[in-house]
Amino acid sequence: MASEADYVVRFSRTERALHWIHASSFLALLASGLVLYVPSLSERVARRPLVKDVHVYTAIAWIVLLALVVAVGDRRGLRGTLRELDLFDEDDRLWLRRVPRPQGRFNAGQKLNAALTASFAVLFSVSGFLLWLGERDTRFRFASTIVLHDGLMYASLALLLGHLYLAVLYPATRHSLRGMTVGTVRRDWALRHHAKWLEEDA
Amino acid sequence: MPLDAPRETPSDLRPYGRRSFLGVTAVGLSSLLWARPVWRSLSGIARPVENALPAGLVPSGGWRIYTVAATMPRFDPKTWRLRIDGLVERPVTLTYHDLLGLPRAEQVSDFHCVTGWTVRHVHWGGVRFRDLLAQARPLDGARVLSFVSAERPYVDTLTIEQAELPDAMLAYEMDGKPLRREHGAPVRVVIPDMYGYKNVKWVERIVVGRSAGAGYWEIQGYDVNAWVGRSNGL
């Protein structure tokens, strides 16, 4: 058995709460959205008005819960996390070109994933709100809104599948799931994958 | 993004995270202006991929199935009836068999939904309204048809003049097959010059009248005369 000292804290409670709220909301929105979108599911489930309500209220709950966690959580820590995700150094740039370089708490791929996920969240919210509003007020109906909303679904589904593969299946990286569940990861694993993070922390 | 101003930032640090976020968000928002034309020009490329997938997995041929009630009406040819009444000389009740016996019309037309999607070159088979109405013979002063759907409480209207446009019909076939359940089996209105919500599915009664009540979506502010490209803010 590894002792306490062999583990390091990778994700705070605030970070984990945000991650899992986002993840579970995304899955609920995907499921209800697919029922609205995929013809064979639409036919089987029917109850479109109900499924629509589930979709819309899940979206509202998602945004409210995220805001709530930011409001009561460790905001200072989050500001630091944002800064880490924002900044790319020379090692990150080389790493993206597949040159093996030591990485910080987030590797360059994870930073890009975070930026894309945040963009998609904004775009999903805006296009979803416009779909809702356009049904009520024709001045807000744009022919491209639905194309954007659907396109985002395909793009984010691809991103999610890649994310799940690395977090759950791929042997070298799947230990990181522990960081997002209990918060800690093995020190020797962190040294191999996120060497600069341990240096900075030391 | 409320980021702290970087303090003692080493010179090789670049805010690529922020730039990716802002760049992708900006491109995404701008796509509200160009996504549909671009998607249309690409759909020719996507078609073979779509066709290779199992039917019903993606909106096939671009159809999306919109309903308003808890369940979709189920069609039983033995019990189904189409009632035409109101301001007519002779109210009639047609069976599915009666309907198929009326003069048959065919057409290929595009279907436009008010939410922004379009299905091109749909092959419809059905009955022209002129032939259908001849069964009941509307009286003088009759101007409007109300189409009552088996999917309660969906209803919508057309003027007789609109219904008698050369490419409007009550369709019972789509792309060479009997109309499928999700497309309104056994009969739906087809009027290609108007958005889909005027193309009532699961029609079971046509009431002929002098003036029109508001249809399901029209109560919620949609245009009564839903001409494609000239209504509903589009």
Image: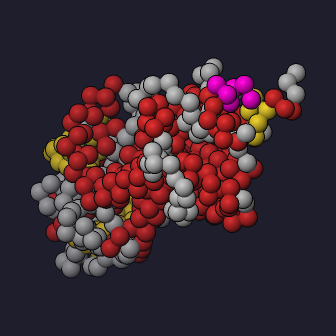
Indicate the quadrant where residue B2 lies. bottom right
**Residue at point 66%, 52% (across, down):** A18
Up the image or down, A10 lies above or below A49; here it is above
Residue B130, position as x, y percentages in the image: 17, 59
**Residue at point 20%, 56% (across, down):** B192
Up the image or down, A135 lies above or below A14; here it is below
Q: Is residue A28 visible?
A: no
**Residue at point 47%, 30% (across, down):** A95
Q: Is residue A23 left or right of residue B225?
A: right
Residue nearest the viewer, comparing A135 with B121: A135
Q: Is residue B106 left or right of residue A11?
A: left
Indicate the quadrant where residue B77 lies. top left
Give the total number of marks visible in the rendering.
Answer: 0
Residue B178, position as x, y percentages in the image: 32, 38
Q: Is residue B24 visible?
A: yes
**Does the segment drawn in magenta span residue A34?**
no
Residue nearest the viewer, comparing A114 with B80: A114
Q: Is residue B124 left or right of residue A9?
A: left
Residue nearest the viewer, comparing A19 with A30: A19
Q: Residue furthest left?
A: B166
Per the rendered image, the range of residues in magenta is A187-192
**Residue at point 27%, 79% (across, down):** B210
Q: Is residue A118 left or right of residue B201?
A: right
Residue A89, position as x, y percentages in the image: 48, 41
